[in-house]
Image (spheres, rainbow, N blue to C red):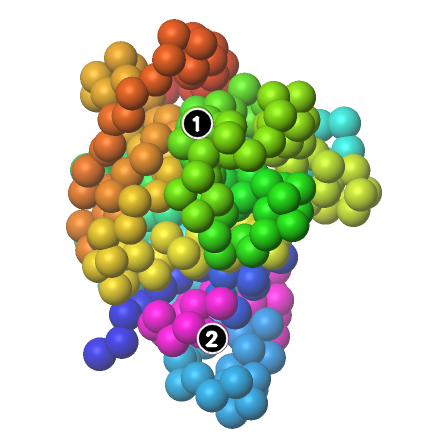
Amino acid sequence: MRTKISVVGAGNVGATVAQLIAYKELGDVVMVDIIEGLPQGKALDLLEAGPVEGYDSQVSGANNYEATADSHIVVITAGIARKPGMSRSDLITTNANIVRAVTEQVVKYSPEALLIVVSNPLDAMVHLAKHVSGFPKNRVVGQAGVLDSTRFRTFIAQELNVSVEDTQAFVLGGHGDTMVPLPRYSTVAGIPITHLLPQETIDRLVQRTRDGGGEIVNLLKSGSAFYAPGAAVVQMVEAIVKDKKRVLPCTAYLEGEYGLRDIYFGVPVKLGAGGVEQIIEIELTADERAALQASAKEVADTIQLLKL
């Protein structure tokens, strides 16, 4: 029996996630959305691409959660998208109500599922999903660091005119303006970028990474990024489905790691069949640790708005 993966929200991010899961044959996909006909139509369209792309994954759509029953993985993308001038925290009230309702339904029909939360403000929404679900911390994880890191990798590769395949980057902290890209741990073929680029160039790339989502929002005018976020989610899904034990920056629940407790925060984790199987602590300089603490304070303040 193939892995069953449900994607809640059939908007741009959800549809991209479903498409890439099908293309990679990671499992059968159920798309769920409250808009009648939307998930069914997109699912049928994806299903009909199977003969061309050569995949046998089944893709279906529904407006109810019964169709998601016994899912192995549930990806939560539901929520309103940012518009120009909005911060991620501006979305909190509306998206908290959506994520709460979604999580309750997911738990009802798939009590053993592993949750990947994508909705913004990410750190607060994944914290809420864990609180509502009552799931153990390893089975509730947020997608943010993979996306932020891939943006940093893109900008590094462009700057140096090298392949993205040889470029690695690490971004820690909250998914927002206070995220903490770590140039010392960001490399090209193993060479730290601090040996390849002047500090002012690194600073510019770091700032562009922090502004990465907003840059796209401002260009689109009426939506937010979805290709890179969708691809980032599917990298996490693949690590879980194939038990790859990938070391990826994800939003995970901390209980003392990095001096932080009772908070969902972006850190490197080992991601496998058990979900978040290990949180990896790395050495930080005093400046890096201070930046991480500042990011954690912003995340904690946003979580406080949930009044859990």
Estimate the x, y position of residue 124 in percent, counting from the top left: 44, 27
The residue shown at (55%, 34%) is 196
Estimate the x, y position of residue 73 in percent, counting from the top left: 31, 57
The residue shown at (34%, 17%) is 284
Q: Secondary structure at mark 2?
A: helix
The residue shown at (37%, 47%) is 116
Decide: is 135 above or below 52: above
Q: Is residue 188 left or right of residue 218?
A: left
User: As rendered, which of 36 and 299 lies closer to the eye?
Assistant: 299
Residue 208: tell me if it is visible: yes
User: As rendered, which of 121 and 291 lies closer to the eye?
Assistant: 291
Compute the Cα span from label 2 to label 1. 35 Å
> Which residue is the site of mark 1?
184
Q: Secondary structure at mark 1?
A: helix
Q: Amino acid at mark 2?
A: Tyr
**Which quadrant holds the C terminus?**
top left
User: As rendered, which of 217 and 243 lies closer to the eye?
Assistant: 243
**What's the magenta region?**
20-41
Decide: is 285 above or below 140: above
The residue shown at (39%, 61%) is 6
Q: What is the quadrant of residue 30 in the picture?
A: bottom left
Q: What is the quadrant of residue 199 in the picture?
A: top right
